[in-house]
């Protein structure tokens, strides 16, 4: 900027020109210092950001409850529900009303690593009574509580050891499933009494 305002006038004396140049120099200096001799350039004013409601595709400018409830972007708008688009469920597999209550699975399902079925309850154990069982009768053993078991469930059993001689004379095992309970019955199908020793039974619910 220095020297921008200096002029040379042929009709003026050199001394006059020098005086004018000095005044311009002073003006330039005042402007740079922001003094009374000049006015500082105003700071740029940023453009205001957009304001007001943004319409994201609902049925009204501010309604976002109807947006893309299926399909690809932007997707079709679902039909209005009781409160502007509540998600309806069958109440069996999935629960929740689409409003204040979150959606959740009514019956949690987990697939095992092989993808061959549902991971069931862990194997549990009981110890049989070890008491006499009359001929042709079935004796209930200590019940096993397993939450989630119903009368439609199935279960299986095994021994953690070789069967004792008292179990080899005609004892059979039957498992009965009721609500949250599995009960083992030892059945004596022979014509005489049998006293099978107390024995650990492994029990596992399949479904």
Image (spheres, rainbow, N blue to C red):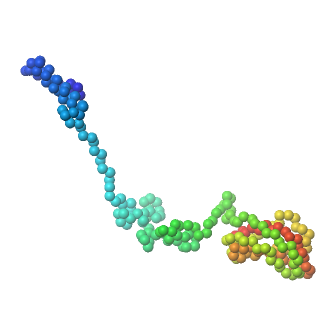
Residue 170 visible somewhere in the drawing: no
Q: What residue is rendered at 48% in x and 68% in y?
A: 100
* Residue 40 location, quadrant: top left
- Position of residue 138 measured from the top left corner of the image (x, y, whole percent): 83, 79
- The answer to whether residue 32 is above or below residue 143 is above
- Looking at the image, residue 177 sits to the left or right of residue 165; the answer is left
Quadrant containing the N terminus in the rendered view: top left
What residue lies at 67% left-to-right and 71% top-to-bottom? 148
As drawn, 43 above or below 164: above
Q: Quarter of the image containing the C terminus?
A: bottom right
- x and y, in percent, of residue 182 in the image: 74, 73
Asked which quadrant contains residue 155, the reply is: bottom right
Q: Would residue 62 be found to the left or right of residue 87 on screen?
A: left
Give me the residue at 82% from left, 73% from top. 173
Seen in the image, is 83 located left or right of residue 200? left
**Residue 103 placed where, x, y %?**
53, 67
């Amino acid at each position: 900027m220095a020297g921008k305002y200096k002029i040379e006038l042929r009709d003026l004396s050199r001394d006059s020109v020098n005086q004018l140049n000095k005044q311009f120099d002073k003006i330039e200096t005042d402007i740079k210092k922001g003094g009374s001799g000049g006015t500082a350039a105003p700071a740029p004013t940023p453009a205001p950001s957009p304001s007001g409601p943004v319409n994201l595709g609902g049925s009204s400018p501010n309604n976002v409850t109807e947006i893309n409830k299926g399909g690809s972007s932007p997707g079709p708008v679902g039909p209005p529900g009781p409160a502007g688009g509540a998600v309806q469920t069958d109440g069996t597999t999935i629960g929740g009303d689409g409003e204040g209550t979150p959606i959740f699975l009514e019956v949690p399902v987990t697939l095992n690593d092989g993808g061959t079925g549902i991971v069931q309850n862990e194997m549990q154990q009981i110890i049989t009574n070890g008491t006499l069982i009359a001929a042709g009768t079935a004796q209930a053993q200590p019940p096993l509580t397993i939450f989630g078991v119903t009368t439609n469930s199935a279960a299986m059993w095994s021994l953690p050891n070789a069967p004792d001689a008292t179990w080899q004379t005609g004892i059979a095992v039957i498992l009965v499933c009721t609500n949250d309970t599995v009960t083992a019955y030892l059945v004596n199908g022979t014509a005489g009494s049998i006293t099978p020793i107390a024995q650990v039974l492994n029990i596992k619910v399949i479904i």
